[in-house]
Image (spheres, grey):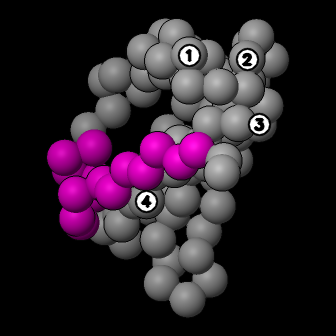
Amino acid sequence: MYTVMSIHTPHPEHRDALIDSMHRFGAAMRGRDGMLGVHTLEDADTGRLIGLAMFEDEESARRLLPLVREAVAEDPFDVWEAEEVEGLHLVEI
């Protein structure tokens, strides 16, 4: 399993727009070959938004991520985000 986690810190006034973007990203990915699951989560303590995408393997992630990023390519993340997005690429050990 290969997991990609993105940690977002939205400006409060752009929180809903960012959540909508994350949902569109997930919808574009669901049901594709090699995809295990995709979730939009919120940290209850900090309010940060977490995108969690789980793939069968790294090859599936490398194949799918560029395709589904088109679903949010026009979104103004530079306006919506209060901090730089932290991205993690996690492998099961």
SS at circle 1? helix
* Amino acid type, label 3: Gly
Tell me the distance, in whole angstroms, between the alpha carbons under discs 3 and 4.
17 Å
> Image quadrant of residue 23?
top right
What separation in Å lies between label 4 and label 2 (alpha carbons)?
22 Å
Q: Residue 67: within the magenta?
A: no
Identify the residue at the far bottom of this view: 45
Dot 2 amino acid type: Gly
Mark pair 2, 1: CA separation: 9 Å
The dot on residue 34 is 2
The residue range painted magenta reads 77-91
Within the magenta stretch, is there residue 83? yes
Residue tagged 1: 59
In the rendered view, tell whether residue 10 sits above or below residue 76: below
| Callout 2–callout 1 Cβ contact below 8 Å | yes
Q: Secondary structure at mark 3?
A: strand
Disc 4 + disc 2, Cβ < 8 Å: no
Of labels 2 and 1, earlier in sequence is 2
